[in-house]
Every structure is written in structure tokens, then in C-alpha cells.
Amino acid sequence: MRMKLLLIGLSLLLLFTTTQARPQANTVRLDVQVTHVKSTEGVPEALITLQGPYSASHRQISTPSSALTPDMREQIDILFKSAPTGISGAIVIDAARRMEAQFLGLPTPSSTPPGPSAEPPVPQVTGRTDASGHFVFENLSPGRYRVRAQHDGYFGPPPLGNTLGAPPTTTTTLTIDAPQSKPAEVHLNLVQGSTLSGRVRSPEGKALVGAEVYAYQITYPNGRVALNSVNSKTTDDRGEYRLFYLPPGEYLIGATLRRVSNTPSPQDSYARTFYPGTADGNAATHVKVAEGSNMTGIDIDMRAGASGIVSGRLVTSFTQPANFFLVPQGGGTLFDPATMNYQNQSSNRTNGEFELRGVYPGSYELIATIPGLNGIQVQAMGRTRVEVTDVGIAGNVVVTLKPPQQLKLHPILDAGAMGAPGTRPPVRLFPRSLELYSAPFDANAVTYSIDASGDFVFPNIMEGLYTVSSSALPANSYISDIRMAGRSVFDDGFAVGEAPEAIEVRISSKSARVQGTVLDSLRKPASTARIVLVPERSRRQNQLLYKTAISDSKGAFTITGVAPGQYKLFAWESVPGTAYMSAEFMAPYEMYGQGITITELSVANTELKLIK
């Protein structure tokens, strides 16, 4: 009897297995190939994740707001591409919506509620590529799918038109039609990471243990030159470091000593030093890292020079500890936002006393903030200029902290932008900081209300320099002017606290359109080129006048919502972030720009040469 039951069980198992393996009449196959970027060589053992088919009930990735800057869009794109395998698409989309709201200073959207109203899970299967970089998914239903490839030590290509930001995965979407004679195909590229190693020595030539070594790329937040840490490691007992899984690119390699206590030590005077041995980032050697390379001997000889002290007293009624930021002043300064936050190392803090150590000689703006209960928003802020001379001491500095102020933004739409009576478009306005270090200023622009006059009321904005940005503008509309106390502050921004009345934000429906084609050196259409419309030199501080687009497979592009004025058009194969807002970055490219005059409601057609 026991043997009979065993045979029946084996028969059922065989029947089940055979049924599952038999291709169904209305199923398709998908052949996924993963190769090295710009190569036909396959990447073996890459993990392939296939999500789908997506049904009509699954929410789609919403179109990004037009108010997002290129950097913001790229960060959201990286969020999608770097989502861990197996995570629900609904969770990723919800995170993207929250990130976008945070960038734009909008109220945080509510999450999708659990239960019957939540979207059903998206089917998901995985596999690994063979020695040739292929994997075939069998028995798929026709529909829309998302395919993702990843591999330890590899990266996806940077976002379109950008040289920064290497996501750990590469992703694409496709629609698989009814069964065909051969499998559907999708081709994904991965970039192999590299390794860079060396030693860090003290000014006396001794091995330094516990030094932090960073691989920096130059970025251009709001047109300023800054450093962005891509990878970091700590030196071992022999002063050696090894940066692995480093995306190919051009880097500055810098080292700094970690402070382990408040007790002064000789290492406190070591300056952050860039390879091969300079404290000036502008004089550092740029290290070019090729895909899959192993670079050795990138040794750094530390320099002395960071022994300055800034000390003084805070004037405030708050008792919570303050955050301190030293923001370097002066054009051409290469700054690292991560190094501007200093700890209060005063032994006596009963009367608001503070002492900041390890400061390099130079001119700074000292910003002190009292964080809110959430640790992000600011309850009070104070700022003052300080000069740290070669003597290295800036003492008796007094910083008076003030609470945030109310800011009103009053939209004025022309007849075309207003729309039909009773159907006013849901325009949203919000302040955007123009400060060199914008984080503490933008932190409070997330809470607002709309009063009976239609003004956007922000109750907790810190004193500083701002402009206005928008979302949900009507089609073909643009911000035409920003006015405070009867004068235009459109180009240069406005200071919160100077005028108690609302800031007028004028919106026009008479925008222009620029369209054309990008051609390479062989006069062939250039796809995925980054096209940038740059205002005339006298207005380049106005971030609202810049417009961007990406060319399609035929090299064609269209830019809408353009304000009248004089511009130059550029088409880059790739460009880092908002580098085109930086005078230093733009200097060698000015000759390649194509001048163009834009008038109201005009349509300009042009042909651009690709800049590589």
C-alpha cells in the first residue's frame, strides 16, 4: 500500500512538472542580454529581475514635475533604478512621490492605504545570465514589463545626458506583443567598477592610520563648483587604503584625519589633502579611472594648515545645542558640503559659548541653527562673517539667532494662463534658496497654506536670499517676473525679511517654443544629447531662464515654456548636473553656443552641433 501511494505521488509530481513546462498557446519568450557598456562582451552571472505584466490597475510612474531641476530628476531616476530586488513597485513609487514633494517644498503626500484599495502586487521572477550574458524567460503573457540587471562591482550607465551618478542597476521597460516566431529581445548594459589604492603619509613621512580617503567628483549645485564624495575608505595599520567598486570617471582623491576626541592632538593641524599632496583642490591632480581598471600608487602626503579656531557666543533663548556651518566665501572656491558642518568643542557652553577647531585660513560666513523637533527643520538661525587669518584665530564672535519669518507668494496669472472661469489651474509656488549652502534655508519650505486671497503662505522661512519656483504651471506658461515692493527681483532674487508684503509672482501664457535637431561630427542624428538653453551673460544668475531637453532617437528635441530674451543653445553628449550654470564650466564652451533671439509666442527652429 505504501509503495502504491508513493507511485501515485510520483505520477502526480511528474504530471504537474510536465504541465508547467509545456508552452501555452498564448505565451511568449524574452531573451535578455547583458553586456559591458560600449561592447558586445557578455556579463555572466548578472542577476536579472523581470516585473510584470503590469495590469491597468497598477499605477504608472508619474511624469516628473516641470519645476524639478535636472539634478532633482536624476536623483528620482536613481531611486527607481537602485530599488532593491523584490521591493514592491508601489513602495518605490510612493518614495519617489515623497522625494519629489520634498524637493519642491510641497506637503508630503499620503501613502497608499493598505487593504483592498492598495494596488495588487506585480508578478516578479529572477534569473542569472549564462557565460555569454544571456537569460531567457519562458511562458510569459503578453503585456508591459520592467527588466532590471545588476551585478556586484558593476553599475548602470549614468542618467541620460549626465556624467554623474552611476546607479547600481540598469533598468528598462518594454511591451511584449502576441506570440512571435522568435523570442522578444532586450539589451542592457553594465559598467564594470574599478579599484584604486595607495598610501597616506604624515608631513613627516610616516604612515597614517585611520585616515579617511575620499574619491570626489566635481559637481555644480546651482552653478557653484563643489565636491561630491562617491566612495570612501579608511587607511589600515600600514596607512594603506583601497577604494573598490569605483565607477569609471574622473576623480580628485582626498584624505582627512578623523577626530576621535575633543582632546587636541598634532593631527588636528593636518589639512584635508588632495593627491599627490596639496590642500588646494583647484591645484589637485585629476585621476582618470577607466572601466575595470586597477590603479595603484595613488599616494597622498598630508599637509599641515588646519589649526584655526573660531570662538564666540550665541545670543538665543533656546537651550538646545546648535548646529554650526562655516561656508567659504569668494569666487572659485572648491567646497565640500560635507565638511562645512563643525562641532562645538567649547569646554564651557553655559552662556552659549562655542569653539570650532580645525578651520583653514580664509573668509567664511558662520551660520548657526537650532534644529526643530524633527531634526531637519530650523527653529532659529543666525549668521555673521568671520575672517580666519594666518594666525588662525577668530575670537569673540557674536551670533544672534532669530526665529523664522512668514513669507507670502502672490500669483498673478494673465488671461491666457488663468483658464476658463472657475477652472483656475492648480499652480503651486514655493521659495528656493539661492545660498551657497541651501540645506538649512530650504528645510522650512515644506509647510504652507493658501489663504483667502490665493497667496501661498510659508510661516517658517529663515532670513536669506531666495527665488521662486513653481509646479503645475498651465501649458506653455512661464514665470515672467518676480516683484517685491514694486521692483523686479526676477534676476537677482529677494531677501526674506526686507519687505513684509507678499512677493508678486507673475505668470504669462505667451511663452515660446524652441525645436530642432542635434547632429554629430558626421552629420548624423545624435540621440540622448543634453540640450541646454542658456540666457545671456547678464542674466545667468536667473535659474528660471535655463531650459533643458534630451534629443530623441532621430536627434530631435523640443523646449517649451521659454521666456522672451537673448539666449545661447548648446548640445552636449553629456554634462554634469547643472554645470551649465557655472561660469567656470562654461568658459571653454562659449564658442560652441548658437545665439538665438526668442520673442513671445514664437517657434524657433534650429540645427545644433554635438559637443563631446
Image (cartoon, helix red, strand yellow):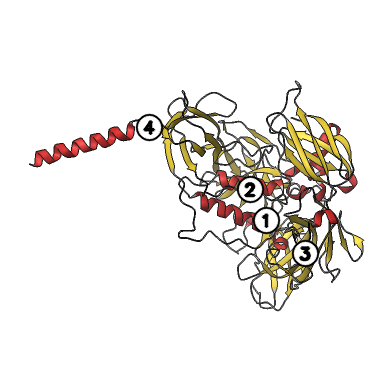
Q: Amino acid at mark 3?
A: Ala
Classify mark 2: residues with Cα within 10 Å, few (<14), some (14-19) or many (20+). Answer: some
Image quarter (top left, top right, bottom left or bottom right) of the C terminus: top right
Mark in front: 2 vs 4: 4
Q: Amino acid at mark 2?
A: Gln
Q: Which mark is residue 394?
A: 3
The residue that disc 4 covers is 24
The residue that disc 2 covers is 75
The residue lying at 52 percent from left, 43 percent from top is: 238
The residue that disc 1 covers is 103
Residue 352 shows in this picture: yes
Residue at the limit of the structure toward the right, as seen here = 486
Q: Amino acid at mark 1?
A: Phe
**Among the 4 quarters of the image, the one containing residue 537:** top right
Tell me which numbered mark, 3 or 4, is placed earlier along the sequence: 4
Seen from the viewer's position, the closer of residues 62 and 261 is 62
Classify mark 4: residues with Cα within 10 Å, few (<14), some (14-19) or many (20+). Answer: few
Q: Is residue 396 above or below residue 358?
A: below
Tell me which numbered mark, 2 or 4, is placed earlier along the sequence: 4
The residue lying at 46 percent from left, 25 percent from top is: 132
